[in-house]
Amino acid sequence: MSSEREAAKAAFLKAHGFGDVRRQPLGGDASTRSYERLHREGGQSFIFMDQPPALESVVCPPNATDAERLALGYNAAARLAAGSVAAFVATADYLRQRGLSAPRIHAYDVAQGLAVLEDLGDGLYATLIAEGQDERPLYEAAVDLQVVLHAETPPDVLTVDEARWPLLTYDALALKHATDTFLEWWPQFAGIPAFTPEAVAEWDALWAPVWVRGEAGASVFTHRDYHAQNLLWLPERKGVARVGLLDFQDALRAHPAWDLTHLLQDARRDVSAALEAAMLDRYLTARSSVEREAFIADYRALAASNAARILGRVFARQALLGRRQYEAFMPRTWRYLERNLADPALADLKAWFDRYVPAEARR
């Protein structure tokens, strides 16, 4: 970290009444954000988020054309927030207004990319389950939270104080651009030939209806990264407020199946087919107006698209950049992808993978 950035952080903390805290660095992820836990004398703690704006490509202007989005780069094409503090703050307020446990924002500076957040603790779903806690009540609460969020149509723009963030649609272009990263990164990682123009054309034709359905069904607030390492268990709270929410700044309007695909086909931990089926049934029972068969078909197709994205953009790309720890998650993600492709409606996509990605290249 540059001395200039450190000076800006220290000045921000001092200006907002946190100049006397003890700062403890926390482990990061594959993003350009970093976090610290701030400790005040007496035991109160906070989370300090640092997202240097210059480290990310620009975000998607609300009225940008497809060509403009592609020219601006991945964040604009895929409609990612580039770690925007405005997105985080506005989204946190939207969630809290609904009685959900997003962190309270104590101080922020959008231009500098800095914020001090409520500390929701260390009770990550992934950690607690690994330590032996029963996973079922945690997943039930996480599904019930989805039901609450999906009961209303979200606004076009999220606002709080001076923070304003458009809630864009996870449209066909965003879905395509994300899924297509499999074509770019998997051959490089697996050591297989680049896909031929004919294979790419077939890929586009097979996926296009999935992306169109994803956009057509985009009607609900969507966290976008809703899984066991971004959810905290807060047992002292009531109902769905027991689910603490993290890393939601990329939120948008999407198909109601989208967050469920992340939760129930978690690339970082095994979710059994039995638990997945039970949680889908719980969701659909609570939302009785949703046509079950059509929803499951969309869920399987979008989950397959998401698995391809994760294998390409998230795991293969990161491994090629030297973050080899992501290789451990790949076999699980392939199993999820193959689970989805077993749906007879996706038989042609299964045939594409069988033809162009041999078993030895799925690792």
Image: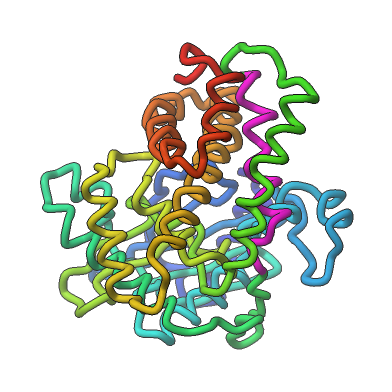
Q: Is residue 205 left or right of residue 31?
A: right
Figure check: 256 above or below 342: below
Which colour assignment does the render follow? rainbow
Q: Is residue 46 magenta?
A: no
Q: Residue at 53%, 15% (x, y): give it.
A: 358
- Percent of width and height locating residue 352: 60, 27
User: Quick one: 154 or 354, which is closer to the camera?
Assistant: 354
Predominant SS along the magenta part: helix
Q: Position of residue 286 (x, y in %)?
A: 29, 75
- Is residue 197 shown above or below 113? above
For the point 65% across and 67% down, the residue is 169
Q: Looking at the rendering, in which quadrant would you find the C terminus? A: top left
Q: Position of residue 104 (x, y in %)?
A: 41, 77
**Pick the front one: 40 or 67:** 67
Q: Locate the N terminus by quadrant.
A: top right
Residue 102, percent from left and from top: 40, 72
What residue range appears in magenta? Answer: 169-188
Residue depicted at 31% across the width and 66% down the height: 143
Inspect this view and state whether residue 41 appears: no
Q: Is residue 155 visible?
A: yes
In the orientation shown, which residue stands out farthest toward the front? 344
Quadrant in the rendering for residue 159: bottom right
* Residue nearest the observer in this picture, 61 or 207: 207
